[in-house]
Amino acid sequence: MATETIKSTINLNKHNKEQLEYLVSIHEINSVTDGINQAIAKFIKDKRKKLYAAEMDKAKSDEDFLTRTMKIQKEFEKSDSEVEGLITEENYEW
């Protein structure tokens, strides 16, 4: 699946651009654009992880959240044993 791209003009730190060009020259990345996209993707992933961790930290002090979570966990406690034997090679089309 091809990723949709847009053209964007940005200003880069000269040293960072030189480092990206070096990585291209030694075939560590395909292009400067590739390096920038990889860096942005990693930055976003790291930020989202931190945001998620902060949300979970906040949630653990929310009594309603904890109650709902424990209730759901209890409801699904036996789910594996309830479906055991329902899906077997004999009754499932591979």
Image: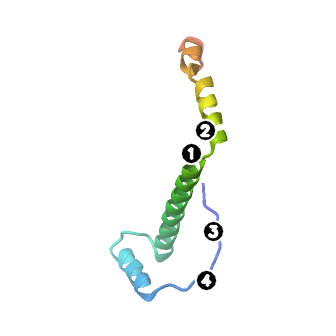
Mark 2: secondary structure: helix
CA–CA distance between discs 2 and 1? Answer: 7 Å
For residue 19, what is the image quadrant?
A: bottom left
Quadrant including the N terminus: bottom right
Q: Which residue lies furthest to the left in this view?
A: 26
The residue nearer to you, when weighing 31 against 39, is: 39
Q: In the image, what residue occupies the spot 36% across and 69% down?
A: 28
Disc 2 vs disc 3: which is toward the camera?
2
Q: In the image, what residue occupies the spot 44% across and 88% down?
A: 14
Judge from the rendering whether residue 42 lies leftward or rightward of residue 63; answer left or right: left
Tag of residue 9: 4
**Residue of label 1:** 60
- Asked if the residue under mark 4 is in contact with the one under mark 3, i.e. CB atoms within 8 Å, the reply is no
Q: Which amino acid does label 1 sit on?
A: Lys
Q: What residue type is labelled 2?
A: Leu
For residue 54, what is the image quadrant?
A: bottom right
- The numbered mark, 2 or 1, whose residue comes first in the sequence reads 1
Disc 3 vs disc 4: which is toward the camera?
4
- Asked if the residue under mark 4 is in contact with the one under mark 1, i.e. CB atoms within 8 Å, the reply is no
